[in-house]
């Protein structure tokens, strides 16, 4: 295959990829550069990103994995992947001690789907698996009830997400290293704990900012949109609330990164608490 020279060539290419989708791992993700080129209103441009994706696709097709046949009643495993622009999955079966691919499913995100959280994207991918496998695989695949349960759980999750999540954060820095602790509390009261170890040295204030970033990213990744962050660092809490100016060059970079992350959330409120109210997270930070 030669590189496309116009929109019609790209459309033919994406059509061929769609026809072979069940054989191609992450086909929608591989096609994203081609879709972007087709959506451009200006003059057609086959840019380096398209050429790179095209070359990787050809290499993949030259070494295409062999799919195996599944039989009725045997268990299948599903592996899910979600990126910014696509969700993908593979169904595999166990042959001896080796897992062999049976079917690939891929879905390019569009419209509101692009704004889904990581968890919502994975749920969408699993729902796609149920629909695709029931329709196309020549085996008995009992997925309907599970698919309904997935959708009910997702709707329940979205409803719960209308209330703010509480996120307690703390950073720890010493001569031996640095780390952060995070405790996410769901509106229903369940807790998620996180301890992170750094592979770099950080000052006390830098560790506190790292803790805020870890808390925001964790909340975003599990689908929270409204977040109430508690920190015992007066400096960080007041800087995030706009009460203190950020003057340190390194902390300015941290504050800018926090702003980038908070743009993906609906509402964030920072609140300073006493150190004794943050003991649980402080312990996690020291473990980190």
Image (cartoon, rainbow, N blue to C red):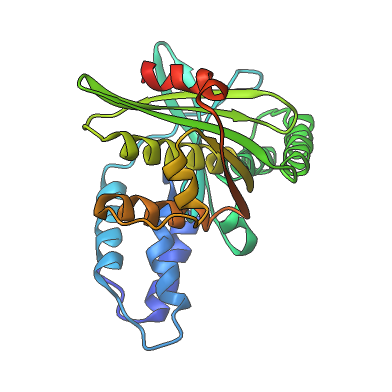
The picture places residue 237, in percent across and down from the top left corner, at: 49, 44
Q: Quadrant of residue 204?
A: top left
Against 125, is 266 above or below? below
Against 165, is 11 above or below? below
The residue under the point 55% across, 44% down is 220
Which of 213/103 is in front? 213
Q: Which quadrant: the C terminus?
A: top left
Which of 116/90 is in front? 116
The picture places residue 18, in percent across and down from the top left corner, at: 49, 58
User: Is 284 positioned to the left or the right of 163 in the image?
Assistant: left
The residue under the point 72% across, 31% down is 143
Against 276, is 154 above or below? below
Number of numbered discs:
0
Q: Residue furthest bottom?
A: 43
The residue under the point 24% across, 50% down is 59
Which of 130/253 is in front? 253
User: Is 37 positioned to the left or the right of 108 in the image?
Assistant: left
């Amino acid at each position: 295959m030669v590189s496309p020279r116009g929109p019609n060539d790209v459309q033919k290419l994406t059509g061929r990829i769609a026809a072979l989708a069940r054989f191609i791992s992450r086909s929608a993700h591989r096609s994203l550069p081609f879709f972007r080129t087709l959506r451009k209103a200006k003059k057609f441009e086959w840019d380096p990103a398209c050429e790179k994706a095209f070359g990787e696709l050809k290499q993949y097709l030259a070494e295409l994995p062999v799919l195996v046949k599944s039989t009725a009643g045997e268990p299948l495993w599903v592996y899910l992947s979600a990126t910014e622009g696509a969700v993908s999955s593979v169904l595999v079966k166990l042959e001896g001690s080796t897992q062999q691919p049976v079917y690939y499913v891929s879905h390019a995100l569009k419209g509101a789907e692009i704004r889904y959280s990581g968890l919502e994207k994975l749920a969408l991918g699993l729902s796609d698996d149920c629909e695709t496998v029931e329709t196309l695989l020549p085996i008995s695949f009992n997925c309907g009830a599970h698919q309904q349960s997935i959708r009910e759980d997702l709707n329940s999750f979205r409803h719960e997400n209308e209330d703010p999540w509480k996120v307690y954060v703390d950073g720890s820095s010493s001569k031996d290293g640095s780390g952060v602790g995070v405790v996410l509390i769901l509106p229903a009261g369940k807790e998620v704990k996180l301890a992170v170890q750094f592979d770099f040295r950080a000052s006390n204030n830098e560790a506190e900012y790292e803790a805020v970033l870890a808390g925001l990213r964790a909340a975003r990744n599990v689908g929270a949109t409204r977040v109430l962050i508690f920190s015992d660092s007066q400096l960080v809490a007041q800087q995030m609330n706009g009460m203190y100016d950020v003057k340190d060059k390194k902390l300015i970079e941290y504050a800018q990164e926090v702003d980038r992350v908070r743009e993906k959330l609906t509402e964030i409120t920072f609140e300073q608490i006493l150190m004794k109210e943050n003991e649980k997270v402080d312990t996690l930070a020291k473990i980190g």
